[in-house]
Image (cartoon, coloured by chain):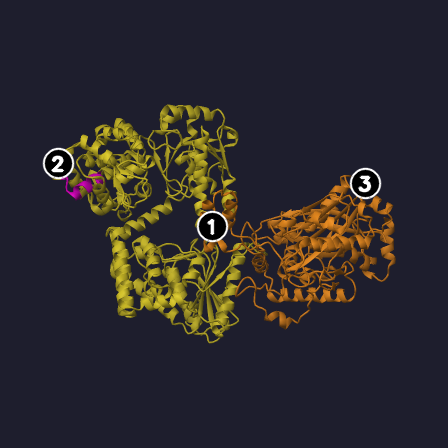
Chain colours: A orange, B yellow
Amino acid sequence: YYTTLTSLCDNSTFRWTIKHSFSKKTLAKPGVKNIVLVDGVRTPFLQSGTTYADLMPHDLARAALQGLLNRTGLPKDAVDYIVYGTVIQEVKTSNVAREAALGAGFSDKTPAHTVTMACISSNQAMTTAVGLIAAGQCDAVVAGGVEFMSDVPIRHSRKMRKTMLSLNKAKTLGARLSLLGSIRLAHLSPELPAVAEFSTAETMGHSADRLAAAFGVSRLEQDEFALRSHTLAKKAQDGGMLSDVISFKVPGRDIVSKDNGIRPATMEQLAKLKPAFIKPHGTVTAANSSFLTDGASAVLIMSEEKALAMGYKPKAYLRDFVYVSQDPKDQLLLGPTYATPKVLEKSGLTLNDIDVFEFHEAFAGQIMANLKAMESDWFAQTYMGRKTKVGAPPMEKFNTWGGSLSLGHPFAATGCRLVTTVAHRLQKEGGQYGLVAACAAGGQGHAMVIEAYPQ
Amino acid sequence: MASVRLLLTRRCCTALKTTTARTHVSYEVKDNVAVVRINDPTSKVNTLSRHMQAEMVEVMNEIWGNAAVKSAVLISRKPGCFIAGADINMIQACKTAEEVTSLSQEGQKIFDQVEKSPIPIVAAINGSCLGGGLEFAIACQYRIATKSKKTILGTPEVMLGLLPGAGGTQRLPKMVGLPAAFDMMLTGKNIRPDKAKKMGLVHQLVDPLGPGLKSPEERTIEYLEEVAVDFAKGLAGRKVTVEKKKGLVQKIQDFVMGLPPVRKQIYKTVHSKVMKQSKGLYPAPLKIIECIQTGIEKGNAAGYLTESQNFGKLAMTSESRALIGLYHGQVTCKKNHFGKPERDVKKLAVLGAGLMGAGIAQVTIDKGVATILKDTTEEGLARGHQQVYKGLNDKTKKKSLTTFERDGIMSLLSGQLDYRDFENADMVIEAVFEDLSIKHKVVKEVEAVIPPHCIFATNTSALPIKDIAAASKRPEKVIGMHYFSPVDKMQLLEIITTNKTSKDTTASAVAVGLKQGKVIIVVGDGPGFYTTRCLAPMLAEAVRALQEGVGPKKLDSLTTGFGFPVGAATLADEVGIDVAAHVAEDLGKAFGTRFGGGNVEVLKMMVQKGFKGRKSGKGCYVYGAKSKEKKVNSGAEDILKSFKLTAPPAVSADEDIQYRLVSRFVNEAVLCLQEGILPDPVQGDIGAVFGLGFPPCLGGPFRFVDSHGADKLVQKMKRFEEAYGNQFTPCQLLLDHAKDSSKRFHK
């Protein structure tokens, strides 16, 4: 892979890479299969309740899968396995992977399973695929994720469910009537799903606000970061960088081909908003948080041999990855802080080796808190058992095509977007290594190192 | 330092005294907001001592004199404490009611100035905000509290036999309404932040923060200050209003409370409720009612005057002294006087999953210590496991625990039927049946499986520890840990050491008890140790009274009328008639006729008939029916009739019966001190009040002797002695005190 480096250095348009010398020339390890990202696509990410409103989750997932087939020209029976992520489950399609795959025209001989790990569900789908390939069980796996917030399962109350289930068993008319008679007004209040931790009952926005306060992140810093995200996303969208987005003809509606949540505003407009979670003195607002989004993503992951044998030009190598977890109350969203140094160590890289950072932006306050935590020796020593801080990524390499705040965040679809974006940015901007990091509900986190495929 | 710097910038025109460095109160001006920080460097908590008050007055005057200051924030630098109250020692040092009244008036004056402050003052509360601390806070214009578990607000003065004497009785009713104010001041209960917000006691809540670039505690206080400063600015700029919009319910309530006959009815109801609960033995609640009533009906001036005068009067009462004595005693008994044990108990094993065993397991896992609960039968184990679960689950219902915390705590409990993992236990507490041969068997079985360092503690209520230790290969590791039922509610732990018990074993047992949240007395070995030994003669006397025809209800009302929280007959049912019989017989054998009185056969017969007390549904009373009115068990009455004794009229008046019961208790307590079972009177008082329900208003048997007069008590006992014999013979130490009135148990 010496060529990789020279080809990079030859490219004089990226002057900073000339001076750059990596700790390692490649992360290929002897005796370990090279696993590659062949390609990745996603449906446009839309604010929930807009054009996708009448679909079901598997419809969106199917669109992404079909888009991947179209983009790669992959023979449908060449896929060994499908892994798909989702967070808020539609009960009718609890294995949404299978339902979507069947409709997308994959062979009915291709098994599919669904994974869930909150906002890193499709990261989990991808690393599951990596595992299947590394273990020699599969050669070509499709991974992805879908989230559909336009419709969520709203349930009857537990009392009502209990009554209804008993009703099934009631044998006589009298028994049924007495059960019906037992229904009270309280039975009728529904149960709504909340973006809240089950263990602490705290909503994520509330936790993000506390986290921002804990790290002394000001409202201004958050609004500035949110504005940065929207501005960069707009630039990327207008500049045609978001090539992972496929067009999707929504049944009964128009063709959708653009994310619709990108809205660069002014700082004055952002400053006017009232805090959304901690009132009246909080700092997290609707504008500096990621919004409820519908969307799906999919990637094709193969062993390098297989990809080459099938005539593909892979986009990137998927290298080391880690999952971390910590206190779901006070450190709910600090996953990237914990995961980044761990995955770098595993790869034998330093922060300086990374050319492209893609972090999941749950909240501007969460990103800023993570950056401050990564810059803090005290935090590293007191809470992470490390000798020194890992350091914060330089902003010029960080989420330069926008992020979840602006592009949208369909929970289980975001992971694939991050990885595909890293691959595309490495191709466009040049560079050897990219790093993906994300936080997730439950106080978990993930990071993965991605290596550019020789051009 | 901040204050010094500030003075320099202010052209240092104030008098000399202000230039001396302040140690308790400091302030800095941030953006026209004076941030006043309190921190008593000599203590873990802030109290409104004379020193603190003086510095506070100085600082406030400087702030009020500074035209640049538009608002102020009052905050503590201690993570767990805003202001925990007035300095009790300051009150105790006063010799007369007038002195205390003038203390109260000084406090009233300061807080009156705070209330009338020309600039808004925001109290930023994190940690305990109690008594005088709360009175300070409610004199401020705005209150912000953290939702930390440590943040509690309340007026606990009543528990010390006092009242909120710095304007509390006057301001609280106006702030939270009459019913809530009564509730707070008469019960002294702690109010958590969420409730305080709902009640209108605080205006805003601030979430406690997790780790950031500083420790959570440090950063939370900083954050609270930041938020408070913002609100202070808002108040000064009139962007924040203090007035809360009143809901319909509130408006109706205000209207109703505005009607004098309604208020009159409330005073009456509260008064009769207090009389019913306190039996008129506690003066403080009545004085509190008087203060509130005067303030509302006769206006501020009269209200404040009544408050300060009543405060002075209460401080001089024996009840207040007794309660304050108990407070100090409790503080002492929450310390380990035996040093740090060589190793921490990280794994505890409890033998026997009965009421006691399960209770011990619950309070242990609750504090994060892994616990094995072993029983011999699956049914017993399941029952014990359920008891622990229920105990914790009830806390989730009260929201003091989340269901996840409950589950996490439960995961520390390992219920089992065998001795698996005992090789890793650091301490074993046995709570098996009270039978010496069973205990011996257990000692041998356990010692075969535990590691050499492991401590063997026995939770017996009467068997001498040295007798149990006789079966042990290592008596230095054997100790008694006598818990009280229900273990999760009763605060006392009586630790019993034999002359072979090592100091480290004692230190370790005390450390475990403290971790379990217990108030601990450490006593010497002997039949019945201290607590059981005091209780047994009193119960024997109770049985005699029953035999003499005093009905259970009458007996209960006589004992509760003396200040015991639970009547003697009910207590016997709670303890268990079988246990009482067992103990009476054992101690009767050990101590002879001094422990006589009632006939043990009465108890034995009751046990035979299945009247084992509450646990069996019948004892002196019948239990089970949901009706509130307890019914006397006619079966027990029949038994009592068959053992009927004639009551000697000379010693059978109501008061005589009360003193017969109490004097036997007290005499035995004093004898325990005389014999060295008890190390000191403080632990004697704490043990009697916290373990046996000795009337708190009397402060325990020793304080009772001091305040009642040993001579008077001896006189009464001599009279009883004539009628009944040696059960009433005063012990030597009591006689010594009777002879010389300068001898006192408490200085």
Task: Please rate how many residues cluster around mark 3, counting C-alpha atoms within 10 Å: few if below 14, some from 14 to 19, many from 20.
Answer: few
Q: Which residue is mark 2?
A: B648
Give the residue at mark 3.
Answer: A30
Q: Which residue is farthest bottom?
A: B67
- Foreground: A229 or B6? A229
Are both tags, 2 and 3, on one chain?
Answer: no
- Give the distance between the C-alpha atoms of the residues marked 2 and 1, in whole angstroms: 68 Å
Q: Is residue B735 left or right of residue A38?
A: left
Q: Circle 1: is it few (<14), some (14-19), or many (20+) Cα within 10 Å?
A: some
- Observer-nearest of B265 and B227: B265
Q: Indicate whether B558 appears above or below B288.
A: above
Q: Earlier in the sequence, mark 1 or mark 3?
A: 3
Amino acid on which disc 3 is placed:
Pro
User: Percent x, y for residue A322?
Assistant: 69, 47
Q: Residues at badges 2 and 3 in contact (C-beta under 8 Å)? A: no
Any mark on residue A180, and which?
Answer: 1
In the rendered image, residue B183, in percent from the top left (x then y), is placed at: 34, 57
Which residues fall within the magenta stretch? Answer: B651-663
